[in-house]
Image: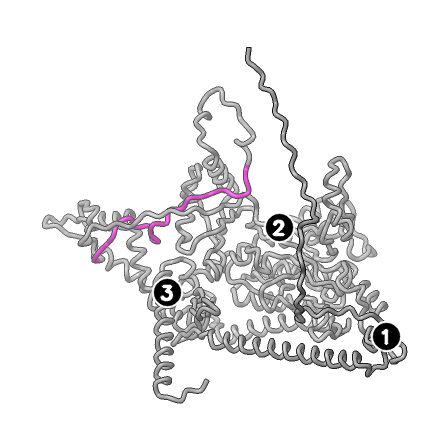
Amino acid sequence: PEMKTADDIEVVKAYDDYRKDYCLEYIRTFFNQHIDDSWFRQMYSPLERLRRARKEQQRGRLEAGEMKKQLEESLGSAAARSTAVVNATQSDGDDQAKCEFITSCRLGGGTRQPRYSDYDSVEKRLDQPLRSANKNAPKQKSSQKPNALPKSHTFSMLSRILAIHDVLPYVTNDQLVTALRLHCSLKSARSEHVELYSSSVSTQDLTRTAYFWCSEAMAQDILAQLNQLSRPSATHDAQSNHIPRKDDTHLPDFLELEVECSDVYGRSEIDADGKGGQPEEPEKIKPRKITVRVSTKSVSTDVKVLSASLSSIKRIPKDRQSAIELAALLDKKQRTPDDIALPAMLRLASLDNPESSQDVADSLDLAVAYLRRVHLVSFYGGCQRFDNFGDALNKNSAGSTVHLRLKNADEILEEAQARAVPNGIPPTSTAGTPGSSTAPEAVASSTAPADAAANVNVKTETGEPSPTKEQEKDLLEQRLDSSIEKAVGDLKTWLEANDNGDESNPILVDRETDQKGIEIESKEKDTEPDWLDNHTIIDEDSRARCSFHFCRKLFKDATFLRKHLLKKHSEYLKAERANCHDQYMMEVWDMQQTRPVPPILVNCGKTFGTVESTVLGTVTPMADDPEPELWKREEERRKHEEMEAAARRDRYEAYQRSRGEFDNGGGGGNGNDGGFSAGGGGASRNRNFVDVDDMKEEKVEMAFDSVPIEMPQPKKKKKKRKLL
């Protein structure tokens, strides 16, 4: 509504100022609360982003080397098993002429899986309780075999990874690694090289999933130790007569792991003045422990089937060129060595110049596997690339899915086109059936580019039929082609803006982020000498003493004291280095439009209650007031209901008028038939309409004289038995 008075304008201005101050304080509080969390630093610290890019670059090179090693071993095994020279006239696509790595890399031959494997129809599915009642009855199985996962598309690190679920935001990666090392009984547990990859946090509860990579022996020992701790108190296990039970060897799906997370950097005492001083009031860091779930199952990879239009043989040469071009750009960005790049693998497998159609498909499948394993790119998932290995392993992302091409896709398209009606609209009986090109697409992803593999064949809101088969096919291919074109264009733009040509120090994130990361790294190095000097006390006899109020150890000279500080109190140095990131993180945080903060709750009165509102904005964040929009919708709803009620009243009044005309004989009939008799020109029918709103008073006399009342019969008295 329009404001007419100055007081109203002042009220609105004051309310807007209050919202600005509240939203600014809200996001600043969230920033200060999570500034030391590892997931928060990986998102907003330029140095942490640069370190993650370096870590991912190293992982990609190791994965490419492992992939080439598997290919060489497979070629050697194929040559050793070969007992005859391959004839030049041998048919294309003969698996005996190919190594196992290439044959297990093929994506063709996918089949649509029925939704219910035990029952082929809805009628049989409804009979499930009746069938399950008879335990001796043979169970019906689906005739189709499940789609097998192509082994060459799986990560080499997958068998050595432990998945850790429900990790709270204030639990750091170092704390998880420390807790897992403590539950390993191997002597090499502390010195063994391990890595921890975390997925992005959930926007709802800020939890994440972590993936711990270690050796197979260490992973098995950790699971065994956790399984032993999860069992009830084993007081009888030490007895000599203890008999092993099934529970002693049973391994559940999840095991609980207790993590010490009192302080982010592992400090147990407080350094009040930054020089080891004691706080004025006795204060200690409060202990805090949480429990996370460690999965005992290996990280699985989903297999889904593409639609017929995306699986057509006509698309394979075009997709091959796109995949090879995309891999070449990513190799240039990541500075992948030439001996382990995709062209070297294609030459090694004799697929660099394919001649047969099977060789063209094999080169495409090898390129798709290379993109997924080395560069974390889901080609058929919309060319979506993940910057973190943990996001590629997450079940909610497209990176954890391998897409197969539908078997006999061209035949299905031809059959569907032959069954089409003359106006070009496909029959409704083929829509959504397994094996049909109009079936819903199996690719599932939460991002817009992944919709390139989506297949829609439903009616619109206006009731019009879905697009024709040719239009639908063009739409699917257009989405996939646009996602490929966008990915290639973005990489070319990035290379033009950030390619410095320096092989020793390449740009990994972008020019500005890498420069700020190098500045923070230099500041961290300069922090160490100052921190050592602040925590060193030189006595009169030139001996050095530790300045921490809870230590106060004395050493011969400053050299031994510095070793002591770096070894025993390194967590305080780590916290001092973390202060170098704060200013840069605040700059990135303030310039971000959308932040991972939960929405605020706005009180909209008794009618609507509390409603969520998202805080958006760069310099001046603001949350919209949802109450005006809610009242607008409420008024529209009430207006719509009033219009519908008025229309119903008009219809009822018109009916009453027509009813009165017929009752008065206007229709030529008698009063009993309402004018709809044969003489009135209408069909004869009885009118049994009763108006419930037309109340009539009737007097009813109630008499109970003639109502027979049955009196209860007296009960017979039983004789009591005398006790002897």
**Could you classify mark 3 by the number of other residues whose Cα lies within 10 Å: few (under 14), some (14-19), or many (20 or more)?**
some
> Which residues are drawn in magenta?
251-273
Q: Magenta stretch: dominant SS?
A: loop
N-terminal-most mark, 1 or 2 = 2
Q: Quadrant of the C terminus?
A: top right
Q: Is residue 247 above or below residue 270?
A: above
Which secondary structure lies at badge 2? helix
Within the magenta stretch, is there residue 593? no
Q: In this rendered view, identify the residue nearer to me: 615 or 94.
A: 615
Which residue lies at the image location 57% right of the left edge and 50% below the top edge? Answer: 156
Disc 1 from disc 2: Cα separation:
53 Å
Residue that numbered label 1 is attached to: 422
**Could you classify mark 1 by the number of other residues whose Cα lies within 10 Å: few (under 14), some (14-19), or many (20 or more)?**
few
Q: Residue furthest right?
A: 678
420 on left or right of 472 = right
Which residue lies at the image location 38% right of the left edge and 81% below the top edge? Answer: 12
Q: What residue type is disc 3 on?
A: Phe
Which secondary structure lies at badge 3? helix
Disc 2 from disc 3: Cα separation:
46 Å
Q: What residue type is disc 1 on?
A: Pro
Q: What residue type is disc 2 on?
A: Gln
Between circles 2 and 3, the one closer to the viewer is 3
Q: Which mark is residue 187?
A: none
Query: Which percent across, then down, holds residue 434?
Result: 76, 58
Residue that numbered label 2 is attached to: 70
Q: Residue furthest front?
A: 705
N-terminal-most mark, 2 or 3 = 3
Query: Which percent across, then down, holds residue 465?
Result: 75, 73
Q: In this rendered view, identify the residue nearer to me: 389 or 66.
A: 389
Q: In this rendered view, identify the residue nearer to me: 209 or 708.
A: 708
Residue that numbered label 3 is attached to: 31
